[in-house]
Image: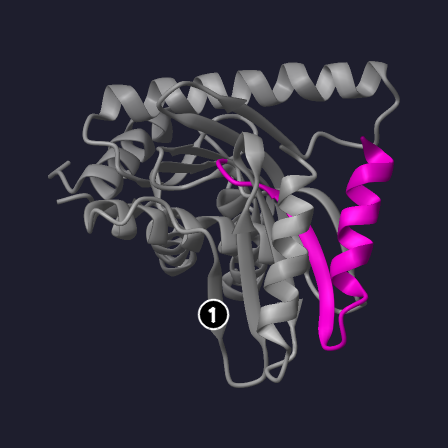
Amino acid sequence: MTARIRQALDAITRIRGVHGAVLVSGDDGLVVAEALMEGVRGHAVAALAASRFQRFRRATEAAGAMAPEFLHLQATDGSLLVVPAANGVLIVAVAAADINVGLARLEMIRAAEAFA
Amino acid sequence: MTVTRAVEPWTLDPLRRFVTESGARLALLTTPAGQVVAQHGFTRAVDVMAAAALGAAIAASTAEINRMLAEPRFRALTHQGVRHGIFLASFETPRGPMLALVVFGQDSSIGLVQLFMEDLVRDLAAAAPAREAQPRAVLAADFERDLNESLAALFGRET
């Protein structure tokens, strides 16, 4: 399992512009595993991304659109990408603003499928 | 309306910020002996006194287990219930050691509480006034008056 998690995170962090990837326990907002560049606060990203994802999930469910499959937060100097996986785990990527979002999304969905 | 009140006024703003950002439902700052410094969300004095005593007792017993395991010190303890989580942390401030007892619901998470607890500790350190050069002696005669003043500060009552 540890090797599979490592492979999944490595595949995401190999994409140009990705500063790191974190596996997060969605309900707790705690880090399960991380591969982050120095200076990125993994536990802060995990807690806040999980909290945002839960809020967005409530919003989409209230709108009758079911749970989100992909979340892309575009900030001034970067992006936060979130894909839910099995067992309440979230795959979170911290990336540059000009990241190839399509490629990152594809790799994150592949990583999520590895947990199914 | 849920209110935040403090016996030590310098703890009020940091605690308010912590509660707002973490989404905590109840928060209690005490000394390791269980003396209440500030509280958020409690409506009855009996509840806050019981929570303070229990929090101090849990921290003391956990610190003792830590000592047996040769761990340097007790830092934090989490209990995740079905509807609520409980987080108990021990930390240092310029005015001495403190305990924080936090109860959070499903609209928050242990990750958020841990994250903003770091900010709370930092904010308290920044807000703390310098320690008194000559600490006031605790006299039995003053105890009841001090207790009543604390309850008044925490629940907004007349003494």
Query: What count of labels does the image hold?
Result: 1
On the picture, is B89 further left or further right than A35? Answer: left
Residue A92 covered by magenta stretch: no
The span shown in magenta is: A1-27
Q: Position of residue A12 (x, y in %)?
A: 74, 60
Q: Position of residue A28 (x, y in %)?
A: 52, 37
On the picture, is B16 further left or further right than B114? Answer: left
Does residue A7 appear anywhere in the picture? yes
Q: Nearer the viewer, residue A103 or B65?
A: A103
Q: Position of residue B28 (x, y in %)?
A: 40, 36
Q: Quadrant of the N terminus of chain A?
A: top right
Residue A21 covered by magenta stretch: yes
Asked which secondary structure carries label 1, the reply is strand
Amino acid carrying label 1: it is: Leu
Q: Nearer the viewer, residue B60 or B110?
A: B110
Chain letter of mark 1 equals: A
> Disc 1 marks which residue?
A73
